[in-house]
Amino acid sequence: MDAAEFRKRGKEMVDYVADYLEKIDKRQVFPDVEPGYLRPLIPDCAPQDPESFEDVFKDIEKIIMPGAASPACTELETVVLDWLGKMINLPEEFLAGKDGQGGGVIQGSASEATLVSLLAARTKTIRRVQSEKPEVTEAEIMGRLVAYASDQAHSSVERAALISGVKIKSVPSDERFTVCGSALKKVLEEDKAAGLIPFFFCATLGTTPCCSFDKLLELGPLCNRENIWMHIDAAYAGSAFICPEFRHLLNGVEFADSFNFNPHKWLLVNFDCSAMWVKKRSDLIGAFKLEPLYLQHHHQESGLVTDYRHWQIPLGRRFRSLKLWFVLRMYGVTGLQEHIRKHVRLSHQFERLVLQDERFEICAEVILGLVCFRLKGSNELNKALLKTINDAKKIHLVPCHLREKFVLRFAICSRTVECAHVQFAWQHISQLATELLETWEPNQQQQQEQEQC
Amino acid sequence: MDAAEFRKRGKEMVDYVADYLEKIDKRQVFPDVEPGYLRPLIPDCAPQDPESFEDVFKDIEKIIMPGAASPACTELETVVLDWLGKMINLPEEFLAGKDGQGGGVIQGSASEATLVSLLAARTKTIRRVQSEKPEVTEAEIMGRLVAYASDQAHSSVERAALISGVKIKSVPSDERFTVCGSALKKVLEEDKAAGLIPFFFCATLGTTPCCSFDKLLELGPLCNRENIWMHIDAAYAGSAFICPEFRHLLNGVEFADSFNFNPHKWLLVNFDCSAMWVKKRSDLIGAFKLEPLYLQHHHQESGLVTDYRHWQIPLGRRFRSLKLWFVLRMYGVTGLQEHIRKHVRLSHQFERLVLQDERFEICAEVILGLVCFRLKGSNELNKALLKTINDAKKIHLVPCHLREKFVLRFAICSRTVECAHVQFAWQHISQLATELLETWEPNQQQQQEQEQC
């Protein structure tokens, strides 16, 4: 949707809201529909091709309003996350379907998805250990639980462990910034020998520093054998899996217990919208609801009949599936694939420009929309380059450390980015690098001395 | 703002967004402002009288846009929560001010505020105990920690303890559904004698079932003496404290470590907007950030310089202070006070109608906008009445249990509610009660028999 159409549609929407407010006392206070009413009214999967705004908008009055906030808010979320799961070809077990035991939920952020899955794993493990050794107290088990993630994983994984009161350890990544099975195996064996209880591994697909991918096909079977919950954090990269040519990056998801990615990062949905799926919803519910009543409820809960308050940290919920539903329909699968492909094309364009300039080096394989690069030379030189770039305020880069190297990150993000923007950015960077290098040599020693003071 | 003005202003806003999108490449990618830029640009407190939409809207381009998302998003939140804190006359220690160690934050829900404060209390207590007895392990301490809340408290308090991996116990409320100091003292003494470590008490102001108030002036000093973190959950009732005549209900907040209420519940701000204040921000940060770097950062953090990602569960944040800022300015303090007062007047109007009908009884003192009432008679009779009311779908009531009694709750909620709505609702309830009672006697025994099957 361009600005001109947004102007038109936005105003129609304002009128719709004003009409609603003016006539609200004509509406019934409680809907007539029964739970499960929504699924038969909408298709089983997202449209391949874009639909018109009119068609989507008409469905608000036809499909959503009769179900008001409840149960429409819950049911649309379940159905649209089935759509999205199918778009990335998630195994059937993760979908809610008509009577599935898995399903999807919208969280606010990947941090919350990681926390929720870690809490579910914690409860599940405590119960398992207690059923095997009833003499061990919960506090003792808690003190021996240990979670794992790559040394490249996002800090939110460490934070989730902190909140949950369990230990967490980094698993060393290899020279491609990837965790492989043998690295995890080694840590697990040491820890088990020391009397710890490994219970949770967070695999990362698309790490924050350089968009590297952990080896699910090695890690997954290992976790399954060892009774370790495998959660996959694909916050950024997950959107790319809607393209068949990138779907192989998700191979091994069949071994996972939970999976998460953020449509608000790269699928044109406004913040916040973090999509999470689990294979066994009873595992999540078990972490948050411990009353004796629970089992009774659990057997009823499947497919569309979902009580999302047991799937998340807050109790209240916003109607976030509406925006996802609108975006999936207005772009269609093909429109969203084109968006992803354009970004990946443009990052490779930038990569080629970097590679053609022998003053620079590429620091990690370019797989999706992120290019890690730097001037060949010291970290101080690259810090100076970053400062010049960000001070000029034409473009903005966020750096990272890859091992001992200070690295610049060029990320393709905007909906409206084009080839010309990438060219402009590269010329700008290249020009600033030239100016920097002209004055760098004479000052370098002085700089270093200043830093030592 | 009525529907007609919403129609006009909403469309102006759509144009503003469309203009922004069309000219986005003319804007700088990073703001020129320095941290702390915002406070001098806006007043120290909320306006008493309403401002015009034009005046508020003008400030978007003037005050917000130069600070873009960062630091404007953070700084407006800190300043507007100082405004709101002053409106309810929170002690100075809870405010951020220029260089305060306290301050406010917008959470998504009261559940998150409770969890965040409980986690802060957990970390603080573990550190204190370890500094006194270095030989005790963290796991041992965790196993002995115990949190408390009223038997009338919201289920989210129990949930917060579950997530945090600590025990929680109910403190018995008295005949007015209130926790007093002696009740907490008794439980504390028993638990300390049993070797447990009491560390957290969640006081409730305005309980969910009947809007009762725990006795802060007794509980606060006790918690302070016993090194127990006192958090106050005033999710619903907190909005009323902007009126001087209700502010006494908050007396004792000076003993609390953290305080929370939901402007999205009763202050005309859209969901979600849960306002939380702490006296010592370093306590919150300590729960989420444990790196050695932390202390360095902590000394810098005060007043407007705030890193909210250490104050909450998710890392990402929305610009929620904008809606609070708009509402406070467009209503002014007097407009919002009038809104609260009207609701309380209307609930007393409903209370009088109930009291005039001797078939009914009032079940808890009416203090704010909630009336708990029932037909004199069995729980079955009242369940039947509720079913008739909700099946008719003219109004909608949510029930509760007060001790052994099944009780109907009449809650004044809507922005547009008037005297006539309350009269209509009461006539409707009264009529349905008459019809029910006409047929009830002969069926009552049969009903009871059915229930026994």
Image: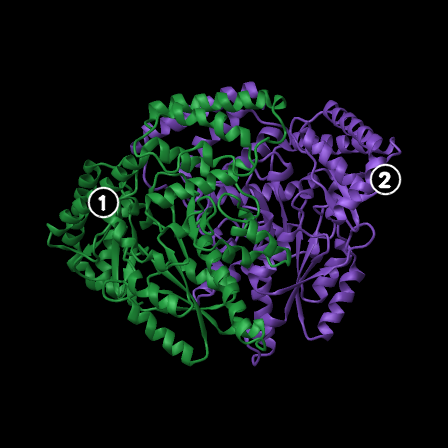
Chain colours: A purple, B green
Q: CA distance from mark 2 to mark 1?
A: 70 Å
Task: Estimate how packed mark 2 is, as few (under 14), some (14 to 19) or many (20 or more) residues with alpha carbons within 10 Å.
Answer: few
Residue B29 in which image quadrant = top right
Q: Determine whether A129 is above or below B411 in the image.
A: below
Residue B202 in sight from this viewpoint: yes
| Residue at left offset 28%, top offset 35% | B335
The quarter holding residue B225 reads bottom left
Please state the horizontal and vertical placement of residue A295, each as a whole percent of the image.
48, 64
**Between residues B182 and B443, which one lies in front from this camera angle?**
B182
Q: Is residue A135 left or right of residue A390?
A: left
In x, y percent, where is residue A286? 52, 62
Residue A367 at least partly seen: no
Mark 2 vs mark 1: same chain? no
Residue kind at label 2, given as amino acid type: Lys
Quadrant holding the N terminus of chain A: top right
Along the line of sight, the residue nearer the viewer: B426 or A143: A143
SS under mark 1:
helix
Viewer-nearest residue: A407 or B397: A407
Q: Amino acid at mark 1?
A: Val
The subunit letter for the residue under badge 1 reads: B
Tag 1 residue: B344
Q: Which residue is mark 2?
A: A376
Q: Position of residue B109 (x, y in %)?
A: 44, 49
Q: Chain of mark 2?
A: A
Whether residue A110 sits left or right of residue B238 in the image: it is right
Q: Is residue A27 above or below residue B365?
A: above
Q: Secondary structure at mark 2?
A: loop
Q: Is residue B391 above or below residue A267?
A: below
**Which numbered disc, 2 or 1, marks the residue closer to the eye?**
2
Query: Where does residue B175 sit, x and y in percent of width and height?
Result: 23, 66
Question: Viewer-proximal residue, A79 or B420?
Answer: B420
Count of labels shown?
2
